[in-house]
Image (cartoon, grey):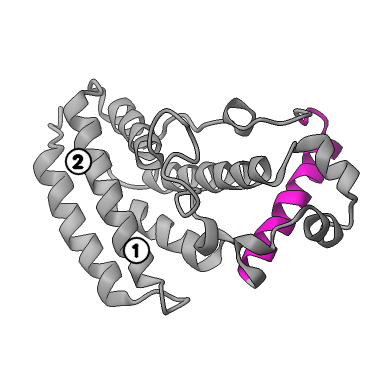
Amino acid sequence: MTGPTTSLADSIELRTIPVQRRSADRMNALLDAAAVLIDEEGIDGVTTTAVAYRSRSSVGVLYRYFPNIDSLLKALAQRNMQRYLEMVAEGSDRTPDIPWSSWDNTLDSYVHMFRHEPGFRGLRFGDIISDRFLDPEVSNNSVIARAFAEQVGETHSIPVTKDMLFHLEVGVTMGSAIIHRAFMNDPKGDKRFIEHAREYLGQYLRTYVPISTP
């Protein structure tokens, strides 16, 4: 199930859009530093001074790319989204082209982000800070649902409808809440919550977003 992923520069306000490899590496170093700080001290620990020090850079360099900490966190949230969608697409390419055969991979990729992506548990896609962190016009879950809908539509050559978007957003909302609970007290994730999410959401998607095979 391949589909478009949102570019970092498309949705995040940057002072300087990194075109050269060196600039892109420097920006990623700033994001990496912020992610580590979130794991260690929480979002409140992400300050300009702390990020500059952890990335072995300077506050001046940080401001060259990000006008403030909020824009840096938005960039990190967007990078989280981009990495997740890429993981979902890569895994889906390895599954049979039948309805919802890639659901396990979609859920497992989300769980993988919680377990292994620095800073993800404390920021996710920015919904911990604001329900409209990625886009001021729609909810974060709407952004994710739209990305999934585009992937489903492209894979199975079907139109993206309002009903599809609605039910995918319901699924995303339920899934994110359950998986968040799974990792609330367990850094590896409570398997009971994870497997219930797999079962219940899988049933919901197959019931409310039916996809006919050719």
Residue 190, placed above or below residue 209 = below
**x, y (%) of residue 31?**
70, 50
Write the residue at 35% across / 32% down.
146
Category of crowding for the residue at label 1, using alpha-carbon neighbours closer than 10 angstroms: few (below 14), some (14–19), many (at least 20): many
**Badge 1 element:** helix
Write the residue at 34% across / 77% down.
190
Magenta stretch: includes residue 23: yes
Say which amino acid is labelled 2: Pro
Category of crowding for the residue at label 2, using alpha-carbon neighbours closer than 10 angstroms: few (below 14), some (14–19), many (at least 20): some
Q: Which corner quadrant holds the N terminus?
A: top left
**x, y (%) of residue 81?**
50, 44
Say which amino acid is labelled 1: Ile
Residue 120, placed above or below residue 163 = below
| Image-based side of 203 in relation to 112, left or right | left
Q: CA distance from mark 1 to mark 2?
A: 23 Å
| Image-based side of 12 in relation to 134, left or right | right
**x, y (%) of residue 172?**
30, 47
**x, y (%) of residue 18?**
77, 31
Give the residues drawn in magenta, as a range. Answer: 18-39
Q: Which residue is mark 2?
A: 99
Q: Which corner quadrant holds the C terminus?
A: top left
| Image-based side of 1 in relation to 112, left or right | left
Magenta stretch: helix, strand or loop mostly: helix
Q: Is residue 203 visible?
A: yes
Q: Which residue is mark 1?
A: 179
**Badge 2 element:** loop
